[in-house]
Image: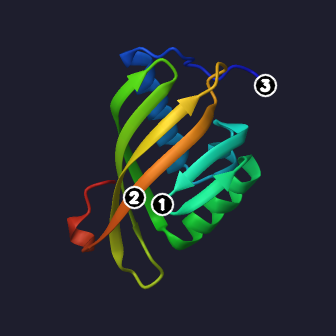
Amino acid sequence: MNPRPPLPPFTEETARQKVQAAEDAWNSRNPERVSLGYTEDTEWRNRAEFIHGRAAVVEFLRRKWNRELDYRLKKELWAFTDNRIAVRFEYEWHDDSGQWHRSYGNENWEFDALGYMSRRYASINDLPIRETDRRVR
């Protein structure tokens, strides 16, 4: 696999670049594109779901974005060290009935030496909102 800069160990600048790259990829809502930022054997916890490997990530994201319509995400660097980054995030989406939601959470990321995310642990809470209360665009 080719290196995926920026590479660890992270500085504040390179950690922010990694967070922005992740935000951009997720906002594409393209499961294949998103999965390329992770190791082949990546390990995730997303809410109460445990996911192992890139192929499972693609399937998970397809299910997610079939359910979470017009998804839009904003990530913010929270902390970093060596090969780890912590972020806080919020994203907004609506279901097939038109009900909007804002989902809040935190993620802990661990990267391999080539800059691919090997572990992603996400804790997420959802809040129903009115469309007029949206703030992530």
Q: Is residue 129 above or below residue 52?
A: below
In this picture, residue 110 sits left or right of residue 94: right
| Quadrant in the picture for residue 14 | top left
Q: Nearer the viewer, residue 11 or 17?
A: 11
Q: Which mark is residue 47?
A: 1
Q: Quadrant of the N terminus?
A: top right
Q: Say what amino acid the circle numbered 3 marks.
A: Met
Side (left or right) of 12 relative to 45 = left
Q: Earlier in the sequence, mark 1 or mark 2?
A: 1
Q: Is residue 84 above or below residue 90?
A: above
Q: Quadrant of the C terminus?
A: bottom left
Q: Where does the image place residue 21, in percent across and percent down from the top left?
A: 50, 33
Q: In the image, which disc is placed on residue 124?
A: 2
Q: Tell me which amino acid carries mark 1.
A: Arg
Q: Which mark is residue 1?
A: 3
Q: What is the CA distance from the residue labelled 2 to the residue labelled 3?
A: 31 Å
Mark 2 or 3, closer to the camera: 2
69 or 101: which is nearer to us?
A: 101
User: Where does the image place residue 27, in percent across and percent down from the top left?
Assistant: 49, 49
The structure residue drawn at horizontal position 64% and vertical position 30%, both measured from the top left corner, is: 116
Return the x and y of residue 108 as percentages of the image width and height: 45, 39
Amino acid type of the residue that numbered disc 2 sits on in the rendered structure = Ile
Which residue is painted at 39% across and 17% down in the image? 13
Q: Are marks 1 and 2 in contact (CB under 8 Å)?
A: yes
Q: Residues within 10 Å of mark 3 (few under 14, many from 20)?
A: few
- Judged left or right of residue 55, residue 8 is left
The outermost residue toward the bottom is: 97
